[in-house]
Amino acid sequence: MKIRKIVIYGFGKHENKTIDFTDGINIIYGHNEAGKTTIQQFIVQTLFGFPQKNSAQLRYEPKAGGKFGGQVHLHDEIHGNCIVERVQGKSSGDVTVYFEDGTQGGEEAVQALVRQYDRASFESIFSFSVLHLQGFERMDETELSRTLLSSGTTGVDTLLRVEKKMEKEMGDLFKKSGRNPDMNVRAAELKEMEKELKNEQERISAFATKMDRIHAIEREWKKAKTEYDSLREQHRALERELQFVPLKERRRTLARRLDDVRTTSFPSDGIRRFEMINSRLTEMEAKNRGLIAEIKAMTGKMPENPSTEKLEEIERLLAREPEWHEWRSTVGTIRDQQAQLHMKRLRLLDRLGVDDSDAVLRADVSIHKEEHLYEQLQELAAMDQQLGYMDRQLSQLENELRDIRNEQLSLQKNAPTEEERKQADEWPSLRGKLAEAKAYVQMSRSNRANGIPQLLWILLIVAAAVSVIGLISDQWIVVVLAACLAVIAAILAIGKRGGQPSLETSEAERFVKAYAGQEAMMEALVEKVRGYDQQQSRLNETARTIERKMGVLEEEYGTIVQKKEQRQKSLNGFFLAYGLLKIPNAGILHEFFGMVRSLQEMERELEDMSQQSELIQGKIRFRLTEVERFIPPGVPETSIYEKMRSVYMSLKEEAQSFATLTQRIEEFHMQMQEAEELISSLRSQQQELFTEAGVETEEEYYTAFADFQETQTLTQQIEDIESQLSMHGAVDEGSDRSEDVLREEVHQVEKALSDVEEVMGLLVKEKTALEVETENLLTDDSYQRKQQFFEIKKAEFAELAKRWSVRKAVVEAIKSMMEELKEKKLPEVLMGAEKLFCELTGGTYTSLVVSENGLFQAVGANGKRYPIIELSQATKEQAYIALRLSLATAKEKTAPFPLLLDDPFVHFDETRFTRMMTIMERLSTKHQFIYFTCHDKIIEYWTNATIINVSDIGSAKGAIIG
């Protein structure tokens, strides 16, 4: 079966994508998270169904929410070209198979295509990844051997899981020395109940006969059971012997070959020793010739031995070279410092602005002097600041006075006239008279209009109420006001009695007429006059206050100006003594004194540097006279030590060369002597090997080794077969019965087993009938209850025993099946795996065998066996892969599926990876490989494979890039 193409509608991160495959090897390449595993799962799930939604396996539903599923285009040798399409539907998806003749099929057609394999069986043989190999380093020897066994046979991993589960459940039911398991608890209860029933039976003699028969039946049943077990064991032995027939035949074939090529003796580790001796002998002879040539060459290069006194004197001077450089560096540093100080001195004089430097150098620049001057300048600055402040105050007061004068002028323009002022003065008295006149006129008119003087009564009531309130609160003004109201009411009442308006009423009406309607105007006039007078008074008082302040400030200003002139005259005389034409700012006074002090300090430093420079120059001149004895004249002062060091190195090299060559020649002579002795010893060892092997030449020696190696291999294979035969128990070595004879004996044993089973069934029926009869004889209620309870417990125990027996039978059946798989299927797979494993390891290991205790072992090229647990991680993986590939090859006819490999070779070195490539290319003629990887080097190695870059996959015709 070959996969031609896949079409992804929507699966994981892939949507509307098509990938074309070819026969042979297809490489699916992409970086992490590119979707390689998604493509692998698409192939598996399309063929075997989507996982359940509550399953631990991922369903890879589309991320964008599109159509879930796709197609896998296949070419099958039986069904031809067909398309398997699976889309979202029921739990595992709706599947349709399209055949090339136009017919369609469903799940049954898919099962026919995949040869009735389920997903677990398919992945256990034809799909594996690096994840299957990462746990090897944590497995013990038993787990690792079981894993390798399951990789070499189909269905073993499922059997092993079932076996573990059954053993656990058996332990939960019964343990030989346990107390808590259910059967142990029931057994203890049954023992106690049997004791109680036995006591009851002693009182019931009617049961004796039938119970004896029941016991006799039990003994007969046990005897039949013993015979049944014996026949069963005989049946297993015959089945086992039937399985051993191919192994015995293989052993006889190997024994005949061993008789033909038997070689019993050869030197231990002979080839390695011989090749090592040969290599060493060749090496020593070449070394001897090289030593002779070296001695001759060194003798021609031997120089003369120089004088040691001259070397010692030069060494003494060279040892004092740091002094010389230090002197020269110090002189140069002093010159640079002197130049820098002269430049600084000039810059300081320029900044100070003085021409007479001597005066500055002699000047007093003490801290006390600086503080005194600073205080004087601070006082002068404070005076300037105070004068400025007073100027601002005077200016502000003048502005305020000018503003007041302007306000007075503006106010004078709006001043009231004499007539207005007179009216305002008269209005307060007129206002009271006007109010009285209005009240009088109003009361007069009201009395004339009404028969009953209502206003008078109202005034009298108000006057009475007000007087009462005044008396209660002790407010006499209120009482007087109430009395006034009472008087007004009385006057109005008298006027009313007259019937005609009086003279006072006429005058009051004329007064009201003259001034009525002028109240608001007169009130405004009064307010205008009052506001003018108040504003005029306020402005005059403010002007007088400002004039007084200005007089005081002007007097203080004159006093401060006189003090400032005196202080400035004193400072001018001080700074003229320093050569300065004007007084500096107080802010730079500290800097001025600092520069003068720096200038004086520079002068002292220049004097010290001149003395130090002269002293060092004398030392330099003396050293030059010492050095000139060993170097030619005319060498510059800067290079004398370099020249002297060159002369010293030349003399030193001549001396060292002479000593070294002399020592080397002596060493070469000793090495020549040792090499000649070793050559003689190696020739003797070589001859001893020839004598031990019984040969005379090198060619005969290698031929004897080949015969001896084949003898060992055949002997080991015979031992392996005998080990496999003995691993399953004692086997009749003298029996040469044919397969047909053994099958006939198996048939006879099976017939005998059937007869014994029938007898056991009859005994059980008779026992059951007797037990029913004894129950009918039982009349005692307590006995019946105990018996019933006993039977219930017995039935429970029997049920538990049945469950335990079923699990025990399953475990034994699994073990028997495992043995059968090892004997029937595993040898064929092992033969293919041995070749692949040997090829992968480059002949380091020649085969894989299963030991007596069921553990895998690797056989080395020297015939030594290595437990699989002792191999490296990569070698364990290579054994696993060899078994898987061998099993897939063995299933080629019944299950010709492609192999899906998810980067399982990451731990291989370059050599073994190249061998793996060779194996896959050889197998690709019959199998299609789809290899998933994220490593760039895989693409570089597999130049003749079809490379499919996942990141370049489009929706048209795939992305085949190589």
Image: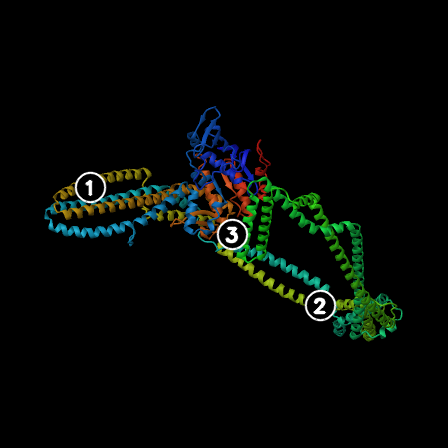
Residue type, numbered disc 1: Val
Q: Which residue is identified by label 1?
A: 764
Observer able to see residue 867: no
Q: Which mark is residue 701?
A: 3
Seen in the picture, residue 847 relative to 361 is either above or below; the reply is: above
Furthest toward the left, the residue is 206
Seen in the picture, residue 6 relative to 915 is either above or below; the reply is: above
Residue 952 as seen in the image, left or right of residue 60: right
- Check disc 2 and report its element: helix, strand or loop: helix
Can you give x and y, in whole percent of width and height, for residue 189 in the image?
23, 51
> Marks 2/1: CA distance?
111 Å
Can you give x and y, in whole percent of width and height, for residue 660 in the image?
69, 67
Q: Earlier in the sequence, mark 3 or mark 2?
A: 2
Can you give x and y, in whole percent of width and height, for residue 726 in the image?
35, 48
Observer-side mark, 3 or 1, equals 1
Observer-side mark, 3 or 2, equals 2
Q: Which mark is residue 880?
A: none
Residue type, numbered disc 3: Tyr
Query: Is disc 3 in contact with disc 1, using a CB cutoff of under 8 Å?
Result: no
Q: Quadrant of residue 737?
A: top left
Can you give x and y, in whole percent of width and height, for residue 387 in the image?
81, 65
Q: Which residue is identified by label 2?
A: 656
- Check disc 3 and report its element: helix, strand or loop: helix
Q: Residue at x 30, y 48 (%)?
A: 173
Query: Is disc 2 in contact with disc 1, using a CB cutoff of under 8 Å?
Result: no
